[in-house]
Image: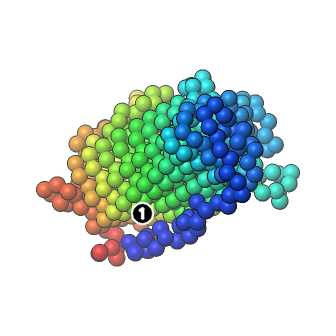
Amino acid sequence: MRSFELDRGLISGIAFSLLLLPIIGTAATIHVYPGQSIQAAVNKAAPGDTVLVHDGIYQEAGTAYCAPWVDGYPSACGTARTAAVLVTKPLALHASGNVRLIGSGASGLTDGIVIMGPGPNPKNPKQPSTISGVEVKGFNLDNFARNGIVLGYVTNFNVEENSVSNMQEVGIWPMLSANGQVKKNVAYGTKDSALWVEASENIRVVNNDLSAAPTGLEVTISKNIVMESNKIHDNTTGIGLYHPAGAGLPQAYWPKFKYGNWIAVNNNVYENNMPNPVNDGGYVGQIPSGIGMLVMGVSDIALSANKISKNNFLGIGVMDWCVGQVMAASSFGISLSYADCVASLPDGFKDATVKSVSVTHNLFGNNGSTPQLPGIPGADLLYVGADAFGGPSGKNNCQSNNKNSGATTTPSIVAMPATGLAECKGWNR
């Protein structure tokens, strides 16, 4: 198992180039004022320029675009997607003052700000598939039909100090991207995750405020992800680290690297008790309320030095993906067996167990007062392996040096089976 010192070192290592991200060469600055078009300025800008948008309310006409990961390449839009602002070149997009970029709800533009590289071109494999060096900073986005800020095939990016609210899907969504940071943003009021890192690597998520979503911060099919010093509250589930079956991308676009090395450290995760706003019976709609952190069917995860409090069901839940799916389905009156869940998993990802998950040095408080699933108790920390139900066992999962802020300093820990959550060795600091 990794030590606390190694985790800290990895945090620094993953950020190998991130401190340099905001430094984007700017040949010129193009100013945009109310009544003018942000998109027109972006179109005019040369690579490396800064587009500086001044205080005011902006409602763009929208630019149609195709997502390579959905439409294929070359892209041929069948169902048009429309971005208020579409960025396809390296530049800095900055807001000065209170800049509001607004949509028109479910019937309006699909997305707010979309930064998108060309994606792989099978007809010309040597063609670059990404754009490198983009910063989006200081915008207030509200009320778009799908997503707030979307990045696809982008490297060396910085998304900072934006406020994203009332999206029908995701607030901030880096996918198929690498070597970036999402920092000091506020995202709330979404029908999917407030912030979702998907199919990406070497991403740092730090000092964000994420609330009022089915999952505040979600990670899927990614590697080398650091989640540090975020405030995550008033969601259905605070942090969700999910098996590839929870991914939104078609499997053909999943990265080929090994997923894992996800670290959540020094986050404040509290009062994630919002009733799930999604009622369609699908995966998102089955996420139970009252969970601080939920780790399902993934491996190589470290949860350290977080403050986790007032989550009514679980402070942290660590479980086999299919066990979680079976339990959630039963609470909705849906019949699902463990074997049927495993059979439905994508080829190459039939292993639904959790492995090498360490839970250390966390401070719990007042979690677990209101259990949500039949037969599953509330707790500060719950581990449920499939071997408790006759399935395969998880491996190398452990906990140590966790505390409770109440009169009883030992957190409530439930492991099913009892042998599934050992004491981490070498963590006595």
Amino acid, disc 1: Ala
Position above or below: 278 against 357? above
Camera-side residue: 124 or 154? 154
Locate the C terminus by quadrant: bottom left
Name the outermost residue toward the top.
107
Colouring chosen for the image of the structure: rainbow
Q: Is residue 423 left or right of residue 54?
A: left
Position above or below: 350 against 109? below
- Residue 233, by quadrant, is top left
Camera-side residue: 335 or 105? 105
| One can see residue 50 in this view | yes
Residue depicted at x 33% and y 63%: 305
Residue depicted at x 57% and y 29%: 103
- Indicate the position of residue 151 as horizontal and vertical percent values: 62, 48
Q: Is residue 241 left or right of residue 92?
A: left
- Residue 222, by quadrant, is bottom right
Q: Is residue 204 left or right of residue 424?
A: right
Q: Is residue 107 left or right of residue 396?
A: right
Residue depicted at x 69% and y 38%: 39
* Mark 1 crowd level (few <14, some 14–19, many ≥20, 10 Å Cα): many
Residue depicted at x 68% and y 58%: 26
- Indicate the position of residue 386 as horizontal and vertical percent values: 42, 52
Which residue is denoted by mark 1 in the rendering?
A: 302
- Indicate the position of residue 334 as horizontal and vertical percent values: 44, 31
| One can see residue 390 in this view | no
